[in-house]
Image (spheres, coloured by chain):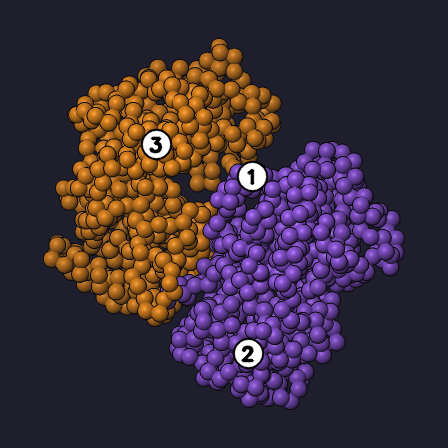
Chain colours: A orange, B purple
Amino acid sequence: MFQTFESSTSPDQGPPRLAALRAKMAEIGVQGFIVPRADAWQGEYVAPCDERLSWLTGFTGSAGYCVVLPDIAGVFVDGRYRVQVKAQVADVFTPVDWPETSLKSWLTDHGAGRIAYDPWLHSPNQIKSLKEAGVELVATENLVDAVWDDRPPRPAGEAFAHPVELAGESSSDKRARIAAALKDAGEDAAILTLPDSICWLLNIRGADIPRIPILQCFAIVSTDARVALFVEPEKVETLGPDQAIDVHPPEAFLDAVGALEGKVRLDPDSCPEAVLTALTAEVSYGLDPCVLPKARKNEAELRGARAAHARDALAMIEFLAWLDSEEPGSVTEIAAAEVLEGFRRATNALRDISFETISGAGEHGAVVHYRVTEETNRTLNSGELYLVDSGGQYIDGTTDITRTLALGTPPEDARAAFTRVLQGMIALSRIRFPRGVAGAHIDALARAQLWMAGLDYDHGTGHGVGSYLSVHEGPARISRVSTLPLEPGMILSNEPGYYREGAFGIRIENLIVVREAPALPGADDRSWLDFETLTYVPIDRRLIVPGMLSAGETAWINTYHAECARRVAGQLSDRAATWMAGACASL
Amino acid sequence: MFQTFESSTSPDQGPPRLAALRAKMAEIGVQGFIVPRADAWQGEYVAPCDERLSWLTGFTGSAGYCVVLPDIAGVFVDGRYRVQVKAQVADVFTPVDWPETSLKSWLTDHGAGRIAYDPWLHSPNQIKSLKEAGVELVATENLVDAVWDDRPPRPAGEAFAHPVELAGESSSDKRARIAAALKDAGEDAAILTLPDSICWLLNIRGADIPRIPILQCFAIVSTDARVALFVEPEKVETLGPDQAIDVHPPEAFLDAVGALEGKVRLDPDSCPEAVLTALTAEVSYGLDPCVLPKARKNEAELRGARAAHARDALAMIEFLAWLDSEEPGSVTEIAAAEVLEGFRRATNALRDISFETISGAGEHGAVVHYRVTEETNRTLNSGELYLVDSGGQYIDGTTDITRTLALGTPPEDARAAFTRVLQGMIALSRIRFPRGVAGAHIDALARAQLWMAGLDYDHGTGHGVGSYLSVHEGPARISRVSTLPLEPGMILSNEPGYYREGAFGIRIENLIVVREAPALPGADDRSWLDFETLTYVPIDRRLIVPGMLSAGETAWINTYHAECARRVAGQLSDRAATWMAGACASL
């Protein structure tokens, strides 16, 4: 099993650790210290040695930060984590509602002046906005690391080549492309600190952290298409030498940054502040030059994505058929997650799950980022909904799928809400749009049917997805704030939902990919885009109110289910094959 | 008649005027001079004395600019005006495709260095972006004015009070509100240069330019709720004195700006650069403080808007009934516009039309900003579409309505496109959305049905509308770029369209107003908004393909038409009453 279900928090350790940190603060003479959840790579998952926030406080959420002052230690968490933080931290810590309470106003309320931070863990834009809000900051060594005696070692996962047959473009071609882009921008080099950018550029993957096959490293790419790679040499030994890549130990990174000349691109949203500080050359602030090319998947990557989704669909369908064959009340959330991972492992191709499976029955479905643990585990009962959001990391692609299922006879208002969520999912699946349109412009298409009934959901409709990389990949999203135009090859999730606190949660998620739309007779002379659907797994017909669908929507779901059945024909167990016949019947 | 149909251009005057301008340039030693269409108030209409661009070049479009160099004079116009500019300017002028060709690259191509501009006619942000693009600029007196011998005098329209019964809030209450907002922002004063802001704040209207009842003036409002108004004293004499308003001649404005102390708000998108230059106090860049309060119409203004729309609907319905009673081929575009204005005048309440009526038959309907002249005038022929976009200025409200009509039997593909445009118009009319949603997020709802068929239109879906003020009023719009959240009281147009060049144009436009949505059973506990429709005039049933509409859309149009009929019952001529029975029949 990749997934574990312990609650990894140890609140009892909090008080002595906090005391040690405060002693260190006093020793070096700082009034406060910020402990963020992020590491130097600003990703979603961090290595055990970088779990500073949970080591200190016990809080294990994926976003938040602690600010330690001599007399109070605030744990700043957003709405998703208000309940969790209270259960996880000892009472020497004070949960703070964030962003409702700003860091600045909290510091003022507690009479704090200048506070210290580790410049490796914050981006220039984060520091800038704190300073603009009036927070006085001073950079320092990491004071948590200084008192963390049994800190785990840095991860030492070995890197491995990502074959060009799957990457679709050689690393040298990619490097030439990035070098040309830098030249066009009048720049001499770019600093890369996002591991998935560097893995994409060099056609490598790594094994440093769970869920995302990345190598923790830094790099500098120059207009001569050469790359200086800063990583522990033993982690890349098996890759063999590459004439265009110079490997240096991580300790050499800041000196190399300081030695750069000319105009250097640096991404102020993701680069550590420490790197900016080391730079003496002219700074050109801009998006990491790999981010957009990486998001536009090429034909080989799309072939891989289709294969990975076909494989993953078989596992999902076996799981859904199994679940329906079990007695109501006999399956727990953890058991369901374990069985699902088992079916994915049975493909013999699963490298990892792509995130912790969200397996939530009844009221747990309404917790958008629910993670089941031994403490929260409960059975899936008849008359409830069950929401399962999961995915697999395969060498040819990353998957992410959510299905919401009826257990026995679901409540009628849940069926109406489910149908509206489905209408939103179908609206995005069917839409065609001119080039230039961004996620911000189509997000409402997924919500309109919910809005008409006075319902909505408090998350974006879709996120980018990597190619055997991060399941949450920038820069494009389908959300109100994403104004970057969608471009062919971008893989996105399409996942509207509806959540009734204390009662049920609904989410339906397919992955879709932007493509040039097939020509239509009588169409304008414009460049049209639409979405190809990657995910083909039945959507629970028992939750659909057929009378609410338009003729076009009904045709879409019937065609979709027919295609689900066609794609897996002859590849299923008897149980699943029988189950599919019912699950894919026309409405 | 308010509207005239001459083509007011005189291309033959261009060469001598250009020669005189170049002589002046040589005299004061500048290499180039920019002649924009805008005046110091950055509005849509300008007074005859400010028609510098058309005086010099002959070009009468509402956007564009001329850059005069010693050897070439470029007239920069966007896609709407490419044909018109060629017909209107003499060959001493060179049309330039803008924004495809940037000013900077054009200047470089023609070896130009530093060019001069009149700082009263450009905002700080316009100047800033030109400078950032590398254009070298120097402020100077206006060189067109210097050589314009028979320049008309400045307008001398008398201001008049806008009754508080219509404004809904006294000027002193508005001033107290603005003063409080400035205090909250830590500011001591705000400079107001938008005439409709000042007219709103002081509850006055004016008669300086056509179509928009504004007073051309400037003002400074302070945290003591006092206003210094800079205007020719004779224009405001009849208003009588107000203890809180100090009237100064316009010449005193820059000195007063220079004498300001503390922190002063200035809107860098609308204020003349000359005003910023005169300011010695600390500048606080921000939106003109009147813009947002003015956009949120109060109950009295909404009552007025409903009354104005009811009155305007009677005129429109009489016009539509008249048009249908005429023989095909017997009516011209100009005649139709004249008859329509006649029906509006017959209300005895029309103060002005709110913009030049767009009266376009057949292929003219596809010209989004078509203005009929004696030269372009043509008859409305059977088998065509006719598009008429018009509005009235009434003391209680400003209207703006577009209807597209079938003349005889329209082409079948026009009916399908019309139905899709209508579906978009209905989608916005029916939508309900949570607070925080902006025009950028719902624009696509009006396009989705067109997009599905590969059709689109190249303009926003809606603009703000003033209260007996500008028919195009900021700051909110329904367009891809408008991220300002919609708020109750904002009046917007809802006008999707479709244009097939050389063939036909379709646009359907109602005005709608944002309101708190009526409660729905089972809805989320959120703040919901929706739109109240202000415009009730039949939509041509002959152009609707009923089979394309959903049940909800059909119900909407039938309810809408029933309401159109109910609202005018007993108030129409016999001809119009008979016509309404057919026009409002259920689909």
| Residue type at the position of mark 3 | Leu
- Mark 1 or mark 2, which is nearer to you? 1
Q: On the picture, is A468 further left or further right than A501?
A: left
Image quadrant in which you'd find residue A410: bottom left
Output the chain of dot 1. B
Give neighbour class at mark 2: few <14, some 14-19, many 20+ (Cα, 10 Å): some
Q: Could you say where residue A203 lies in the image, as x and y percent from the top left?
A: 23, 35
Residue ID at (38%, 60%): A526
Q: On the picture, is A266 further left or further right than B310?
A: left
Give neighbour class at mark 1: few <14, some 14-19, many 20+ (Cα, 10 Å): some
| Residue type at the position of mark 2 | Arg
| Residue type at the position of mark 1 | Gly
Mark 1 / mark 2, whichever is N-terminal: 1
Q: Secondary structure at mark 2?
A: loop
Output the chain of dot 3. A
> Are the numbered discs 2 and 3 placed on the same chain, yes or no?
no
Is residue A455 placed above or below B415 in the rendered structure? Answer: above
Q: CA distance from mark 3 to mark 1?
A: 43 Å
Q: Could you say where residue B217 lies in the image, as x and y percent from the top left?
A: 76, 51
Give neighbour class at mark 3: few <14, some 14-19, many 20+ (Cα, 10 Å): many
Nearest the camera: A72 or B393? B393
Residue wearing tag 2: B378
Q: Could you say where residue A255 lies in the image, as x and y percent from the top left?
A: 37, 17
Is residue A553 placed above or below A258 in the rendered structure? Answer: below
Q: Is residue A339 visible?
A: no
Q: CA distance from mark 2 to mark 3?
A: 63 Å
Q: On the picture, is B360 further left or further right than A460?
A: right
Residue wearing tag 3: A194
Q: Which mark is residue B113?
A: 1
